[in-house]
Image (cartoon, rainbow, N blue to C red):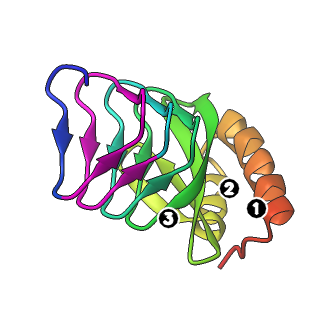
């Protein structure tokens, strides 16, 4: 564990997990074997990461998220996609919202989020590939 990590109650970490500095895990999070979290990652209650999951610095995941994919860093924030009960969600900075809401938020005229929208194209494809709804 890195410096100043905070783990909630009843968290389970698999073998050889590595957490960067200032990571925060909510209650009942489960990390599979060989997971790596970068500095400043925040996971909500009951998140589940599969074996070998790697998340870069500053990832944000909301409660009950699973099947996480790190999309990369653009426009100042790291973006991740995960599913909650079959619905695709995006985490970025302090935001955690459905893929549909993320597309509306960053796709507004004048937002100047071209690189973020490129990452969202990947998110759309991943969600479709995995059968997640966009709600």
- Dot 2 falls on a residue whose secondary structure is helix
Tell me, yes or no, whether the highlighted magenta stretch contains residue 15: yes
| Mark closer to the observer (2, 1) | 1
Q: Which quadrant would residue 10 be assigned to in this image?
A: bottom left
Stretch in magenta: 10-31
User: How far, Cα to Cα, is label 2 from label 3?
Assistant: 14 Å
Decide: few, some or many residues near mark 2? Use Cα within 10 Å; few <14, some 14-19, many ≥20: some
Q: Whole-Å distance between the Cαs marked 3 and 1?
A: 14 Å
Tell me if residue 21 comes above or below residue 30 in the rendering. Answer: above
Residue at 62% x, 47% y is 110
State the image coordinates of residue 51 (x, y, percent, origin top left): 57, 42
Please provide percent x and percent y for residue 42.
Answer: 33, 44
- Label 2–label 3 contact, CB within 8 A: no
Residue that numbered label 1 is attached to: 127
Quickly name the residue at label 2: 107
**Mark toward the viewer: 2 or 3:** 3
- Residue 123 spot, x, y in % from top left: 73, 52
- Per the image, label 1 sits on a secondary structure element best described as helix
Residue in front for this viewpoint, 39 or 94 = 39
- Residue that appears at 41% across and 58% down: 47
Residue at 72 percent of width and 41 percent of height:
119
Marks 3 & 1, CB-CB < 8 Å contact: no
Under circle 3, the secondary element is: strand
**Left or right relative to 114: residue 111:** left
Q: Nearer the viewer, mark 3 or mark 1?
A: 1
Residue 130, image quadrant: bottom right
* Residue at the spot of label 3: 97
């Amino acid at each position: 564990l890195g410096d100043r990590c905070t783990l909630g109650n009843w968290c389970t970490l698999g073998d050889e997990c590595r957490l960067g500095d200032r990571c925060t895990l909510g209650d009942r999070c489960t990390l599979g074997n060989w997971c790596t979290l970068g500095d400043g990652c925040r996971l909500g209650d009951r998140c589940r990461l599969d074996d070998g999951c790697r998340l870069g610095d500053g990832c944000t995941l909301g409660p009950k998220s699973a099947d996480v994919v790190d999309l990369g860093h653009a426009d100042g924030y790291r973006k991740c996609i995960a599913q909650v009960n079959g619905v695709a969600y995006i985490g970025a900075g302090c935001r955690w919202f459905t893929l549909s809401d993320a597309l509306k938020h960053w796709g507004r005229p004048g937002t100047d989020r071209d690189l973020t929208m490129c990452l969202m194209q990947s998110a759309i494809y991943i969600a479709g590939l995995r059968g997640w709804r966009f709600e």
